[in-house]
Structures are given as C-alpha cells and as structure tokens.
Image (tube, rainbow, N blue to C red):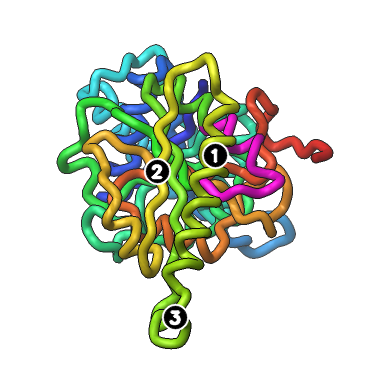
C-alpha cells in the first residue's frame, strides 16, 4: 500500500500526519508526504513568471515537508519508507489528486478544515475537491486527532446500505481493514423522519419492517466474507444521522468507512447528502470509498461497471 498525505504547517497538517503515520505502521505501507502550493502569477512578457516568487513558494513547501519528516521520524515511521513531494496547483485538493495519480497512491489522507468542532470533521475546500473526484479512497482525520491519537486501529465500521454498486467498494474497504489488521463491522442506519409519529399510527410497524430488511441485507453482505474473520452486524434505528450515529458505540481506534453516493461518477469518490452527514457526525476518522471501487483496481482508471 502506498499512502499519500497532504501536509501543511498547521493543526490540520499535524492531524493528517498523525493518522497517516498510524496507517503506515499498521499496514507496513510506504508514505508520500506532499505539500501543494499555488502556482505563480504570470509576470510581464508572454510565458514568463516571477522567479523570486516561485523560489519563495517552493521554499515554503520544502520547509513544511522538512517539518513533516521530523514529525514522522518522531512517530516511528522509518525514513526509508517516506518520500517528500512539492506540487503546484491552484486547488490543493485537485493538486493532491494529480500527485496521487503520479505516484500510484492507494489512499489519500488529509485533516479537517480548521473551523470544525474538536473531534469532528469539517469539509473545507481541499476536502471538497477530493470528495468530489478522488480516484482513490480518502481518509479524513478529525480536528485535534494529533493531540491524542490511539496507539493502534481497533475496528473498521462500514456504513452500509444495500444497492447494486456496493459490492466493489465494500470489498475494497474489507481489503483496507485487512491491511490495517482490524475486524470489520457493517452498520445500517434506519432513520425515523422527524415528526412522522404524529401523523402516522403505523410508524412503528414501518420502522420494524425497515429494520428487519436492513438486518437481512447486512446478513447477505456479511456472507460475502464467509471463511474469513467474523463480520459484526448492527442496525441502528433513530431520528437523524447525527443522533442515530451518536448512539452507536465507537472504539478509540475506530475507523468509519462510507461508500460514495450512487449518483457520483464511476471510480471516483463523490460525497452525497447522506455520506456528507455521516462525515460531519462521525467522532473518528472517516474513510470514503470511490463508487464502483474494486479490490486491486489501478488508481485513477475507470472501467466498465
């Protein structure tokens, strides 16, 4: 596995680096730490740029990556598995996508936008670009993750809904769980619309039937991994994604995986309304899987599905 971490000299970069280091240690992966800086503005004359400004931007990126290398060494990540890369692009997220394709990354790790609540994930411009076009899974660190990271990963919970294109991403998530050395749990949220109980007398029966169908779907999904480690199943019933997810137990070393919206482009991450609510409500790192992802599929290449 090759991990790409987007690093900047701030708390967001520190959170991403702490999470990436944990992945590298758990999976025995190699790591590319990248800093994306903006391109220079054209100077006078066709095709010319301000050389001093270019040198400044590259120097800032190199200084940031030197900090990253020191932090990784302190996190027991061997220098031999770390590569540092400076890249220029107007959008940091789109720049990371370019780097991911160039280095054949299997996973991109970034931190939360700084405006988010501590322990939660806020979607900033970098994440927004990645979560609407990355060809490989994206792992997001909650704000403040570097302050008290777990010693190890303990479990991967996959937010699962039965649909036609779920097999590939589900199997790819299972491969990542195996690489991290953790068991997998399948979770389906059955949501009660707010205020519906006051209008419909049979709401309890409807929810019971939905929960029973969710249990059956989870059994079928778990059966795909027969012969491997046991897959835990959980159906959680509640009102709203945040409240329902808040009632689900999460271990200190939990990772919550979420499949991309079925309306997004094939082989790319696409953050839909439901998955976006899960990302913002999760109290742990969140892994977003590209739609149609299949185990062992080359990054950045689309195939017929």
Q: What is the C-alpha distance between the residues marked 3 and 1?
A: 43 Å
- SS type, badge 3: loop
Which residue is disc 2 drawn over? 234
Q: Tell us which disc is closer to us: 2 or 1.
A: 2
* N-term-proximal mark, 3 vs 1: 1
Q: Nearer the viewer, residue 38 or 32?
A: 32
Residue in the image at 46% along x and 21% along y:
178
In the image, residue 183 lies at what x, y percent?
Answer: 38, 25
Residue 190 in which image quadrant: bottom left
Q: Is residue 39 visible?
A: no
Q: Residue furthest left?
A: 148
Residue in the image at 16% along x and 43% along y:
147
Q: Which mark is residue 137?
A: 1
Q: What is the C-alpha distance between the residues marked 3 and 2?
A: 26 Å
Residue in the image at 35% along x and 20% along y:
26
Residue 150 in which image quadrant: top left
- SS type, badge 1: loop
Q: Residues within 10 Å of mark 1 (few under 14, many from 20)?
A: many
Q: Residue furthest bottom?
A: 199
Magenta residues span 160-173
Residue 164 highlighted magenta (yes or no): yes
Q: Tell us which disc is closer to us: 3 or 1.
A: 3
Which residue is disc 3 drawn over? 201
Q: Tell us which disc is closer to us: 3 or 2.
A: 3
* N-term-proximal mark, 2 vs 1: 1
In the image, residue 7 lies at what x, y percent?
Answer: 38, 42
Q: What is the C-alpha distance between the residues marked 2 and 1?
A: 23 Å
């Amino acid at each position: 596995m090759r991990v790409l971490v987007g690093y900047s000299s701030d708390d967001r970069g520190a959170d991403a680096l702490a999470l990436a280091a944990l992945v590298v240690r758990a999976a025995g992966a190699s790591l590319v730490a990248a800093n994306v800086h903006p391109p220079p503005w054209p100077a006078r004359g066709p095709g010319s740029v301000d050389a001093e400004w270019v040198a400044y931007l590259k120097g800032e990126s190199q200084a940031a990556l030197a900090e990253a290398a020191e932090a990784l060494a302190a996190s027991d990540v061997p220098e031999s598995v770390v590569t540092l890369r400076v890249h220029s692009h107007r959008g940091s997220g789109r720049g990371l996508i370019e780097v991911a394709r160039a280095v054949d990354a299997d996973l991109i790790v970034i931190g939360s936008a700084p405006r988010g609540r501590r322990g939660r994930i806020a979607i900033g411009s970098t994440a927004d670009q990645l979560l609407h076009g990355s060809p490989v899974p994206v792992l997001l660190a909650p704000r403040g993750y570097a302050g008290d990271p777990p010693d190890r990963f303990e479990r991967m919970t996959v937010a699962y809904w039965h649909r036609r294109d779920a097999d590939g991403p589900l199997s790819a998530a299972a491969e990542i769980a195996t690489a991290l050395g953790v068991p997998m749990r399948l979770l389906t949220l059955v949501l009660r619309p707010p205020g519906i109980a006051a209008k419909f007398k049979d709401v309890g029966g409807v929810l019971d039937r939905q929960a029973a169908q969710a249990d059956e779907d989870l059994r079928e999904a778990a059966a795909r991994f027969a012969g491997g480690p046991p897959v835990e199943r959980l159906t959680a019933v509640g009102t709203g994604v945040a409240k329902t997810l808040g009632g689900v137990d999460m271990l200190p070393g939990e990772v919550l995986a979420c499949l991309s919206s079925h309306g997004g482009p094939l082989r790319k991450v696409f953050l839909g309304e439901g998955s976006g609510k899960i990302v913002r409500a999760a109290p742990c790192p969140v892994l977003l899987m590209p739609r149609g992802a299949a185990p062992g599929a080359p990054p950045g290449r689309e195939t017929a599905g």
